[in-house]
Image (cartoon, rainbow, N blue to C red):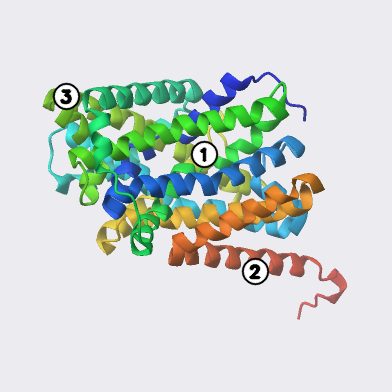
Amino acid sequence: MEYQRTLGPLQGIAMTVTTFIGTGLMLLPALSVSQAQGLALYAWLVTTAIILPVAFVFALLGSRFPSAGGASHYIGRVFGPKAEKAVGWLFLSILLVGPAVAINIAAAYLAVALNLTQDSVFILSIVTVFASVFYALAGIKNASHFQSIVVIGLIIVVVLLSWQGDLIAATKVIEIPTQWSQWQTALLAMGTIFWCFIGIEVMAHMGAEFKNPARDFPIALLGGMFIVIALYLALVLLITHHHTFGDEITNSQSLALLVGKIFGEHAKKLFAIGAFIIAFANTGMYLLGFARMVQSMSSQGALPSLFSYLSKDGTPVFAVYFVAAMTLSSILLGHFSEWSLHWFIEMTNGAFLLIYTLTCITSLKLLPNKQKWLGLLASASCLLMTSFVGISMLFALCIFAIAAYFEYHKARKKRIPDHKIHVQ
């Protein structure tokens, strides 16, 4: 497959920003401030520095080995097809924890828009799941155009908040960590902040599309990341300064609360409506994306053939139903077990971080000698991040181990010659 080399640095910057801006902007700044207070800014800067080598590795692999399989394809080239399929199962396992976060954000903003209490968020989450099913079944045409509008809208909101909310005065809340105990407090938030960079595997598909990858891609990546981090840091400072963070629900509604404090209650409700639409659309794309993965695995025989059915519009209907059922189960589990939203974020982060770590390790073999140092640095960065995600990595490790054993056992059974199988 040949990619069309049409991207310049400006289009690349726009794609980078689009990749990393979404519902995370409505939750992560407040969540990181809740964990690290005035030290959160340093946690964001350190996390960004750690993630940059990983982004470059994905871009280099994408330009050398363009494939729709992305990370699983690179891992398969080095560790074999069984490992590639196990990574596919690990991607699918994210369904158990990931979509619940986006749905909770959507429901929290809907509660603000409807002027309902915090107790209504659970019911609204269930309603959002069912509504998202209809949205996903519609096929979500022109999703990329909608995402671009979302990104532009969020950037405008952050700029207006920074101007009216006195960002310069907000910088006074910054605390400079001078002792190791303070650095430990700041670094606690890194496991949460990593959520911002989920989707970095998309960078693998960008490298081959630049007119001059060697010159333009670093500009696009660094320029886009600079804009993304500037937006997040501005919100970290404003949320700390105006104190719109706290418990789980407050963090979920933090951006609307910030708009309310700066522009008034009427603006808060208008923003909450817009934020719900954005989060709802992202949830629908989330569900459809996972449904496509289920449909693909079904067509390969890994899941029942029922899930490979496509409607006249090309929508994997039964796969959408399956994904919705799993998401609903995740929300019910989170509510009745009283597990926090932070737990679901870190479980998702752990799964993606394991995938990124394996990909960076494969780069040590797939990249040319003059670029192996970058693969080594990225692998070390991923291993460092695992220490901040901590025990939440167990979810991903267990899923991957079970999936790898399942694929190995299945392959071993297929190798048994027919003449050795006796039926009594």
Counting residues from the start of the chain, the first of labels 3 and 1 encountered is 3
Tell me the number on the disc at residue 381.
none
Question: Which secondary structure lies at badge 2?
Answer: helix
Instruction: Give yes or no for contact between labels 3 and 1 (Cβ–Cβ under 8 Å).
Output: no
Q: Earlier in the sequence, mark 3 or mark 2?
A: 3
Task: Tell me where residue 115 appears, x and y as whole percent.
Answer: 12, 34
Closest to the observer: 315 or 293? Answer: 293
Q: How many marks?
A: 3
Residue 255 placement, left or right of 67: left
| Crowd rating for badge 3 (residues with CA inside 10 Å; few <14, some 14–19, many 20+) | some
- In the drawing, what numbered circle is on residue 289? 1
Question: Of the residues shown, which amino acid type is indicated by label 1?
Answer: Gly
Residue 343 in the image, given as x and y percentages of width and height:
36, 58
Amino acid at circle 2: Tyr
Residue at the location (59% across, 25% down)? 12
Q: Position of residue 93 (x, y in %)?
A: 51, 55
Q: Position of residue 293 (x, y in %)?
A: 57, 44
Can you tell which quarter of the image residue 109 is in? top left
Is residue 20 visible to us here? Answer: yes
- Residue denoted by label 2: 405
Q: Secondary structure at mark 1?
A: helix
Q: Amino acid at mark 3?
A: Phe
Distance between the alpha carbons at the discs numbered 3 and 1: 36 Å
Does residue 302 appear in the picture of this structure? no
The residue furthest front is 178
* Residue mark closest to the camera, 3 vs 1: 3
Instruction: Quickly name the residue at label 3.
Output: 263
Residue toward you, 136 or 61:
61
Of the residues under marks 2 and 1, which one precedes in the sequence?
Answer: 1
- Marks 2 and 1 sit apart, C-alpha to C-alpha, by 26 Å
